[in-house]
Amino acid sequence: MRPVDMEAVGRKAAGRKAVDRKAAGTEVTGARASGRGAAVVGLSVVIPAYNEERRLGSTLDTVIRYLHETEGRWGAWEIVIADDGSTDATREIVTLRRDPRLRLITSPGNRGKGHALRLGVAASRGRRVLVTDADLATPVGELERLDRALAEGHSAAVGSRAVPGSTLGDRQHRVRELLGTAGNLLIRGTTVRGIRDTQCGFKLFDGEKARTAFAASRLDGWAIDVEVLRHFQQAGWPVAEVPVHWSHQGGSKVRPLDYPRVLRDLVRLRVPVLRPADALAAALFLTMAVALYSGRLFDPAHRYLTDSLQDQNQWEWFFAVTADNIAHLRNPLFSDLQGVPDGVNLMANTAMLGLSVPLTPVTLLLGPAVTLNLVMTLGLAATAAAWYWLIARRLVRQRGAAFVGATLAAFAPPMVSHANAHPNFVVLFMIPLIIDRALRLCTVTAGTRTTRDAVILGLMAAYQLFLGEEPLLLAALGLLLFALAHATVRPRAAREAVRPLLRGLAIAAAVCLPLVVYPLAWQFSGPQSYTHIDHGPGTANTVRALLTFAERSLLAGDADRANALSLNPTEQNAFYGWPLLLLSLAITVRLWRQPAVRALAFTAAAAAVLSLGPRVHVPLTGTEVPGPWALLSGLPLFESVIESRVAMICAPALGMLLALAIGRLATARSLGTQYAGLLAIGLALLPLVPAPLKSEPRAEVPAFFTAGAWKTYVRPGESLVPVPLPEPTAAEALHWQTTAGLGFPMPGGYFNGPYGDGDRSGVYGVPLRFTASLLQDVRATGVAAVIDDRARAEAREDLAYWRAGALVLAPQPRDGVLRATVEKLVGRPGRWVGGVWVWDLHEGS
């Protein structure tokens, strides 16, 4: 008997995967070992064995006798005993028989039934492979029933005790029966659908498919049956469940602790295997996100993202007020802490309830600045990982190509711009998952999974709505553009996909709508709701904005140029640069025959044109022509979209084009072609590498708020009035409020709400009353306003409307003239308390 390299056996048997390297040291004994020159037999019987000296002998006698009697049916056969490190005489029982058709595979140690079967099936040579337990609880004569199922076209036949026609002899202990029934219910619900009894140890497989499935397995324990059947189902290989006779045999190797181990293995089956390349990609994405936010990563409470303008204050307030609402069991869709007396419709703002609600403990424990920092850093890395998963799953096999494509999708200039202040446009990890689930609905062969995929899609869409509605709308627009292009280049596939897609979308909508109907009704019809919001002029891209480089480009950034072509540093929504656009054009021309390339190119081009707005400036002419966005700009939802953001759709589309190009380069025969292509890609991407986001020390919060001195001046039901009132360009008072534990409300603020007085069009902040407008003008101009009796009367009316308990003026530019103005309005000087000037409005009342 000679030892055989079991890894070579596994590679031959599986055809594509080697047996687990941990099987090194296994040996095969018998007349001939499986290998490249081994003869194929009609049937292989694989029996796992561990300390089976008492019953293995009789089992072998029974099986051999049956195979002799039915040799005309099976032809040449073999029996493979996979010994799992037995410490008794199990091996000797096999070797002493010296039957050339009896083969022993030994393992140096006990690893489990799954490990033994993996080795035994890998060493088999049969066109069909029977896997049976050593106790023969199912008589070997039942094999004929299973064989008929394979003859009818199935790839596997599973002996079952749970389908009509099965019979039971001696039964197990009642507790074991209950545990087995519960386990099968769990398996059917989570892992292998449609098979009632996966654990009956009597299964017949197509040989090649069995060797492939077992070689791909990774479980060593009792759940190997579940893993292999799951592999068959995922591969689309039909499995039949056949009734058999079964009788309990004593000496079972199943122990009480094996039941929780099976549960553990079921969890492992549901968790994808992380390849080293995938782990490296995830680590690199996290490293890039950390580098981008390095300016405030380690001290978020005392560092401010310079280019976020006032958005960091706003977002921290959203996270803080949501946590406060949850902690006090208040409505998370509304707050009265800003905009006194009307309040804020949080659902009509970007409060990201999908994260701010579950992260409430983090916010309460560590503060909203830490929560926001975690959300933006980890969210950006998760978004890149999700695009990587989608590209590797759907487009290319090369992990390096998927990495480059995902990096562009998640770290493109528009994404980096929004990383300053807009987590709803940074945390997009659900979008690739939604795209993948929608694509599954287009597959006619999905069969019974269509309903499941549709339900999951509905749940995903509902969750994304609570992360960001506008990104979901843009994703839907991008998918529609891609679908139109793909239907044009592959009309037959489109026609076949229409019915399952529409059915799936209907199911998804039926799942999603009940979950979101109330929040959406609150958003569009609840307190402080609005119909649409006008973002003002200059919200569209220009052709030049698409061709040039963003401010945060490490090598080519120019702040003055970028800001002249965008609304502000947080809205640089194009800036892909002319090298990348030229490269994308070259890729499209070179790979034009691929339908995916044409569809992606159209999607990117169409999104870029739409982002130019309803009136497109023709370069070098000074003229304007109507743009296609004019067809959408007046539609509900689209009328509130900043049209330049549509260019963000280009990022994943261009990333996928790059991934396809790199995938093609990997198969190029010429090294010169590979080097030239990779050089072109590197040169196109180099100007887009972002510099870390700018940050600066945060202004100290006055002790008046940190020490709680404000409590003396603001009674229950009253508000604190900052001078001037907080508004979108100066919202530091929101930071004071969150630092003070949201203990007081205040008028004004930075949020979206209705204009008021019957006009439900949206505005940023609140419409300015007389006193708010006066104080804002004084701060802006530095010129003292004329205060007369009429002005004092207006101020008294405004303070009463705001239910003001105190006016507070913190040190700031032009605070002297602001202080003088307030003294004239109130009629008395303020007091210096805790680093601020305070006017107690209860004095003299």
Image (spheres, rainbow, N blue to C red):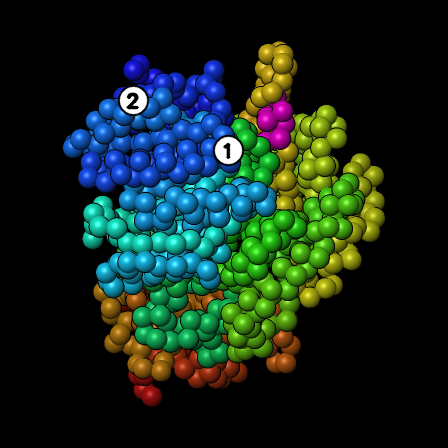
Residue behind mark 1: 72
Whether residue 514 is situated above or below residue 493 in the rendered picture: below
Specify the quadrant of the image occupied by residue 722.
bottom left
- The residue type indicated by label 1 comes to Gly
Sequence order check, earlier mark of 1 and 2: 1
**Residue 519 visible to an observer of this rendering:** yes
Which secondary structure lies at badge 2? loop
Which quadrant, please, contains the C terminus? bottom left
Place of residue 618 in the rendered image (x, y in percent of width and height, measured from the top left) = 80, 41
Left or right of 681: which side holds 345?
A: left
- The residue type indicated by label 2 comes to Arg
Q: Residue furthest front?
A: 69
Residue behind mark 2: 98
Q: Which residue lies furthest to the bottom in this view?
A: 845
Whether residue 198 is situated above or below residue 786 in the rendered picture: above
The residue that appears at 34% across and 75% down in the rendered structure is: 329
**Residue 359 visible to an observer of this rendering:** no
Place of residue 286 in the rendered image (x, y in percent of width and height, measured from the top left) = 40, 38
State which region is magenta.
Answer: 659-665
* Magenta part, dominant SS: helix
Which secondary structure lies at badge 1? helix
The residue that appears at 31% across and 35% down in the rendered structure is: 60
Task: Depth check: give the residue in front, 406 or 536.
Answer: 406
